[in-house]
């Protein structure tokens, strides 16, 4: 992640491969194909297609030479709950990590470049966005198909050294950036002047399906015609800084339909010379021609002073829950950061909880096993004994295998107990029992449990971020972890990484505030906590993970070469951390 941030800071764009972006390409393809069918029905003159696009808020743009061929779809986030709450939230978290500030969705579209489709001349995005009262944007381009020079992939010119003297310069999160001379009016409106474009060094960005390309509104870019015999599709999601307000406000109602309001209807002045962006006046944009001013924008809000969440008591509240966008964005960033440390994929969900690591363990034990399931607790220390106590308090059906507290559990004894019981569905254990420094063989236990049709529930509070733990093998149903310990955050914030299929299974909750399924559904629906979040611990953890990533060069914990058990225990005893 540190390398990605540096690329973006230096060049204005950064390329994130699919393996790191963890885009569920098959799901995204299904979602977009459904929207594309609606758009194609509309272009074919179908009344049903016309009505469906109108109800969903889709804007459909045909090819200029063929009104029945699809060229572009806009406002796809409002028409697809998965894209709106899943993909957009994840992209916003990545961008906020790149720029260090909260962002909000500004616009979205999908460009469909058919065989023979034309390209776009060199341009910056910022001139087109000035009329909306926002001056810094970052776009996430999600590749539905490979993007190559042969099919009209993007090219970037990451240096502004060629900008002539006197060029308009704006202060941005990347520092001062130039708005380059460009044509205004006519068919070339917004294109960088040819003399300047010809002097730039253009770099083709080759990307695979599922890759994400981040670029800001100041980096010059262009594309060529699609010379291949296949269609090339790219989803573009553009965000602006939350402190600058919403240039294009996406108001999403219960039906998912989007209404769009804009802060200005005044386009850039049309003239024959290059257009210079208007200066600020009293906190508002004043076009240099015309008398209409934009509506006032919301003042910049610093997340440390504005992360106020208003939520009513109880799980079934009558009124809407209100959260400052910065709080929602911070939660999304932390979920993405924890997933990156874990190396988990889209099959898993990171569920934050208010409370210490024990809260996460209790939530995991209360939420994952159903009433008919049978849990075997492998107890060889104080924290696995706490698991037994939790299950007894909540009446969870369980059995206990008590082992020697001075060494890792004997897998042969575990297997014998599994055979004896015969109906165990889950096995619970602690990765590292800190009281006596015992590191347990979780990989071996997972393989053993899988052979007997059971899955693991693991307390990894004392090892997460330092020792590898494969959460994508399918052997783990859930893992509990904490913000403090190896990540060096503050106590009071914990997480459970759980299998999405498990969380989606209906079940009667045993608790209210520790119900993982309800917590997961809330985050997936609107990004909000059900109850008051520990904001100070969240902000501290975000900074701690950034330092963690810098120290580890962005490698996930699954890529770390572990110490031997003896070396790990010795390192732990030297640590000042405490449970």
Image (cartoon, helix red, strand yellow):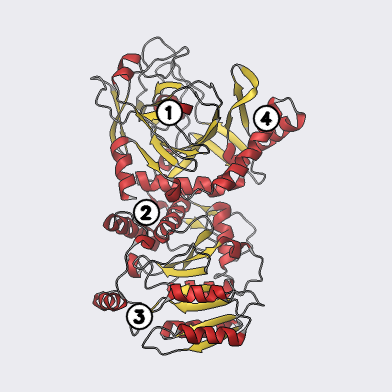
Mark pair 3, 1: CA separation: 55 Å
Which residue occupies the extreme right position in the image? Answer: 47
> Dot 2 lies on which element?
helix
Mark 3 — residue?
434
- Disc 1: which residue: 149
Sequence-first tag of 1 and 4: 4
Which residue is label 4 attached to?
Answer: 40
Foreground pick, 245 / 414: 414
Task: Name the mark nearer the viewer: 3 or 1.
Answer: 1
Tell me the CA gap for discs 1 and 4.
27 Å
Residue 397 picture quarter: bottom right
| Residue 413 location (% of width, % of height) | 49, 87
Q: Check disc 1 and report its element: helix, strand or loop.
A: helix
Circle nearer the N terminus (3, 1): 1
Above or below 342: residue 234: above
Q: Indicate which label's residue lies in the foreground, 1 or 2.
A: 1
88 with respect to 574 (left or right): right
Horizontal and vertical percent position of residue 528: 52, 56
Question: Label 2, on which residue?
Answer: 304
Number of numbered labels in the structure image = 4
Q: Is residue 311 above or below residue 19?
A: below
């Amino acid at each position: 992640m540190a390398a990605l941030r540096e690329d973006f800071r230096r060049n204005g764009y950064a390329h994130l491969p699919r393996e790191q972006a963890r885009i569920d390409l098959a799901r995204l393809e299904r979602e977009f194909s459904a929207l594309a069918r609606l758009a194609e029905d509309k272009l074919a003159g179908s009344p049903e297609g016309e009505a469906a696009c109108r109800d969903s808020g889709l804007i459909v743009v045909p090819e200029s030479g063929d009104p029945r061929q699809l060229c572009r779809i806009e406002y796809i986030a409002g028409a697809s709950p998965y894209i709106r709450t899943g993909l957009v939230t994840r992209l916003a978290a990545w961008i906020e990590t790149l720029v260090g500030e909260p962002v909000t969705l500004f616009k979205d579209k999908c460009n469909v470049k058919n065989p023979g489709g034309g390209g776009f001349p060199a341009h910056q995005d910022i001139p087109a966005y000035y009329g909306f009262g926002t001056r810094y944007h970052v776009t996430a381009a999600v590749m539905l198909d490979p993007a190559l020079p042969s099919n009209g992939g993007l090219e970037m010119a990451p240096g502004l050294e060629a900008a002539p003297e006197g060029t308009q310069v704006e202060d941005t999160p990347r520092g001062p950036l130039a708005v380059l001379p460009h044509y205004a009016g006519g068919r070339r409106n917004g294109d960088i002047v040819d003399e300047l474009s010809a002097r730039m060094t253009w770099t083709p960005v080759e990307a695979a399906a599922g890759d994400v390309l981040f670029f800001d509104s100041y980096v010059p870019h262009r594309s060529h015609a699609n010379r291949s015999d296949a269609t090339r599709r790219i989803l573009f999601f553009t965000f602006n800084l939350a402190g600058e307000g919403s240039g294009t406000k996406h108001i999403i109602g219960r039906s998912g339909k989007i209404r769009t309001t804009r802060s200005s209807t005044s386009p850039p002045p049309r003239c024959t010379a290059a257009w210079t962006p208007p200066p600020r006046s009293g906190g508002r944009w004043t076009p240099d021609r015309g008398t209409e001013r934009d509506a006032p924008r919301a003042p910049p809000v610093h997340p440390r002073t504005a992360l106020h969440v208003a939520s009513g008591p109880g799980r079934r509240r009558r009124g809407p829950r209100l959260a400052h966008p910065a709080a929602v964005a911070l939660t999304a960033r932390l979920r993405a950061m924890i997933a990156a440390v874990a190396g988990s994929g889209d099959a898993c969900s990171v569920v934050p909880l208010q409370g210490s690591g024990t809260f996460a363990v209790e939530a995991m034990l209360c939420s994952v096993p159903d009433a008919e399931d049978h849990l075997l607790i492998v107890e060889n220390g104080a924290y696995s004994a706490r698991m037994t106590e939790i299950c007894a308090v909540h009446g969870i059906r369980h059995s206990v295998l008590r082992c020697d507290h001075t060494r890792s559990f004997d897998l042969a004894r575990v297997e014998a107990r599994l055979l004896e019981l015969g109906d165990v569905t889950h096995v619970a254990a602690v990765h590292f029992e800190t009281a006596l420094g015992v590191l347990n063989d979780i990989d071996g236990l997972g393989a053993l449990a899988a052979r007997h049709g059971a899955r693991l529930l693991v307390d990894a509070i004392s090892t997460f971020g330092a020792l590898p733990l494969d959460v994508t093998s399918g052997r783990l149903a859930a893992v509990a972890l904490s913000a403090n310990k190896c990540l060096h955050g503050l106590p009071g914030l914990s997480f459970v990484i759980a299998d999405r299929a498990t969380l989606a299974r209906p079940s009667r909750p045993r608790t209210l505030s520790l119900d993982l399924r309800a917590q997961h559904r809330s985050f997936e629906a609107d990004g909000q906590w059900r109850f008051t979040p520990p904001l100070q611990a969240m902000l501290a953890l975000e900074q701690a993970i950034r330092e963690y990533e810098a120290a580890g060069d962005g490698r996930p914990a699954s890529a770390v070469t572990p110490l031997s058990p003896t070396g790990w225990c010795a390192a732990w005893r030297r640590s000042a951390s405490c449970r």
